[in-house]
Image (spheres, rainbow, N blue to C red):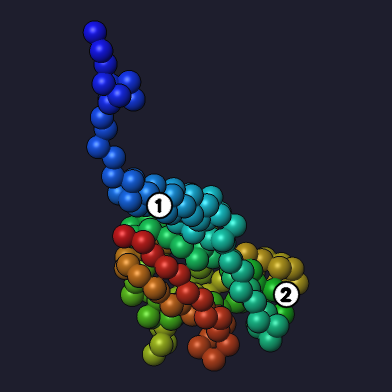
Amino acid sequence: MSTSPKDSEGPDLNQDLPFQYRTWRIQRIAWGAIALILLCAVFGLFGHGPLSRATIRDPSLPLSLDYDRFGRYQSALILRVHVHERAANQDIVRIWLSYDYLSKIEIKQIVPEPDGAETSPTGMIYLFRLAQPEQRSDVIVNLEMEAIGFIEGRIGLDESHALTFRQWIYP
């Protein structure tokens, strides 16, 4: 029984090496994209993490703000307003929030509860009576996002003395 040289080389496979090389290149690009997405998630680009938290201060204002840069539509977020000692006027602190921001959120709770609220042409002013006006106090605003995309907010003692912050809200 004689065998032809073709039989001794193994089975005849139709190989398309250029197609195989393109497939490998696409797989490597996909692996890189998946790794990049996972890295972004770990650092907080899609929710909680070091890239997500931000603090904004202005040395000329007696308050600062901690907030989340990224959030989700109809999910809870927190604004933490740090009121410094020099903010109180006769033991009362006024915190102003712009109507532009208020129209895109729903406030669930404010801690401590405000003693009153006033409207202004550009926003809402919440009044807080401080137990110890000579010490720094915190006001925590628990809210729910009611809009998607970039949201710009302003918070301060009044419209002319306010901090501007931006948030990206995912669907």
Regarding residue 61, the answer to whether it shows in the image is yes
User: Which percent across, then down, holds residue 82?
Assistant: 64, 69
Mark 2 Cα-neighbour bin, 10 Å: few <14, some 14–19, many ≥20: some
Q: Amino acid at mark 1?
A: Arg
Q: Is residue 138 left or right of residue 35?
A: right
The mark total stands at 2
Q: Could you say which is closer to the camera, residue 79 or residue 127? A: 79
Q: Are marks 1 and 2 in contact (CB under 8 Å)?
A: no
Question: Residue 85 shows which numbered tag?
Answer: 2
Task: Tell me: 31 left or right of 67.
Answer: left
Q: Is residue 65 above or below residue 51?
A: below
Looking at the image, the residue that sits furthest to the right is: 134
Q: Nearer the viewer, residue 32 or 115?
A: 32
**Local secondary structure at mark 2:** helix
Quick check: 150 left or right of 113? left
Which percent across, then down, holds residue 168?
A: 42, 68
Q: Locate the N terminus and report the quarter of the image it occupies.
A: top left
Q: Give the mark, 1 or 2, whose residue is nearer the N terminus.
A: 1
Occupied quadrant, residue 132: bottom right
Image coordinates of residue 52 in percent, x first then y, are 53, 60
Instruction: Name the residue beneath numbered marker 1.
Output: 25
**In the displayed structure image, the side of residue 60 where residue 49 appears, left or right:** left
The spot of residue 103 in percent (x, y) is 33, 75
Residue 73 vertical position relative to residue 94 in the rendered view, above or below: above
Cα gap from disc 1 to disc 2, whole angstroms: 60 Å
Amino acid at dot 2: Glu
State which quadrant residue 138 falls in. Answer: bottom right
Q: Which mark is residue 148?
A: none
Foreground pick, 149 / 28 = 28
64, above or below 45, in the image: below
